[in-house]
Amino acid sequence: MPKPFDVDDVISIVRRAIRKAREDSAAQTLSDPESQVSGIIGSSPEIQEVFRTIGRLSNSHMTVMITGESGTGKELVAGALHKHSPRADQAFIALNTAAIPSELLESELFGHEKGSFTGATSRRIGRFEQADKGTLFLDEIGDMPADLQTRLLRVLSDGQFYRVGGHQPIKVDVRVIAATHQELDVLVSDGRFREDLFHRLNVISLELPALRERVDDIGDLSNYFFQLIAKELNQEAKVFTEESLSLLKAYHWPGNVRQLENVCRRVMVMGSTREVELDDLPKEIKFIDKEGPESVDLQWESNLRSWVDSELGTEDAGPIISTVESKFETILITAALAHTKGRRQAAAKLLGWGRNTLTRKIKQYKIAD
């Protein structure tokens, strides 16, 4: 800063520098393969963006909405957000709202007083009270019943609630992180989710990429799982051969990272050698060529080959791979957006991408939607 300088300006710059250092430190810790603090593994651009977002939120108490397909690691990310927040020393409470019967969910969230209903033989502290000063992670928030959505909105608004059967208000300071694999905006349009609650939860949106969008991470993820499982079983860790790894990268992974972990567990137990060969893989992966889009009419392949041959035969032939990729993806994106009437999240789901990936490609190819 040039002299003479204003003291307030110096303080402001120092504060920004400290905040930036904390964000960078959190992102570096998350992405460091040696630390594996959060259990989130990968070096792909898609997962690195998740790390950066967690880093940017490292000094925040804001409500976060995590979206993504089942098995992408939403609870791991929620845990990382808590560990790298000012509330890290307080409780992190996780609750899957879809796993609790609707008639018990209210008591699970807010607790109950003795005698408030049949079977309530004593006072029970709910998850909100357990998470006071800490973080409450509500998974599958889209499945929450309408009456509880109303109660949750009130808690988020003023930090107060009543236990079931109680008459004294309970005041708490809880950071809420919600997650869902559903499209909440569609549920709002259908009247199945409160719009005001959606906006209250969706302060910061963090979308997790599907495993098929980050296939370059499969090697690191599988090695991590093999090491973890080997310790549990007191065995030597296995490793995928290059051929096996190539087939894993071609698979569409409907169950995402959770499915990959299950595959690693299966081959750790059933495999007879340290190296996992093609024959050791589950049949749903080995027979991918009979299940996926490869089994449909492949006439377009011969047309593409003819076009490539003609392009390569010209004197000013350019980088053919990037040209084909841009044309191919532009057609896919345009068709998907037309099919969904411009709704990006729905279009991304059809294409098997995350919304962030689709948005990036729309900007990259300058597609008007």
Image: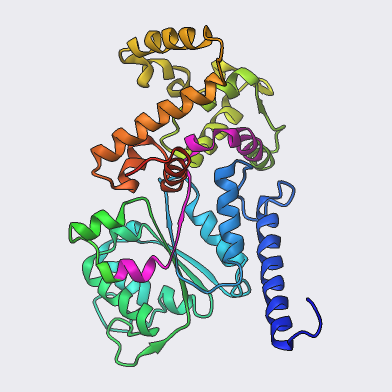
Left or right, 317 with respect to 288, comes to: right
Q: Quadrant of the C terminus?
A: top left
Q: Residue at x 32, y 51 (%)?
A: 182
> In the rendered structure, which segment of residues is drawn in magenta?
197-225
- Residue 337, picture quadrant: top left
Instruction: Compare residues 311 and 77 and report the one nearer the observer.
Output: 311
Of 209 and 325, which appears nearest the observer? 325
Q: Measured from the top left, where is residue 213 in percent x and y?
A: 49, 37
Compared with 348, 49 (above or below) is below
Q: Residue at x 45, y 84 (%)?
A: 172
* Residue 26 place in picture, x, y as percent: 67, 61
- Judged left or right of residue 80, residue 111 is left
Taking the view exactly as shown, the residue that stands out farthest to the right is 3
Identify which residue, 231 or 91, lies in the foreground.
91
- Quadrant of the rendering where the N terminus is positioned: bottom right
State the image coordinates of residue 226 (x, y, percent, origin top left): 64, 36
Q: Residue furthest left?
A: 191
Displayed quadrant of residue 156: bottom left
| Residue located 61% across and 71% down the image | 88
| Residue 212 belongs to magenta span | yes
Q: From the top left corner, tell me how far across and down residue 9 is, in percent.
A: 70, 82
Residue 134 included in the magenta stretch of the image: no
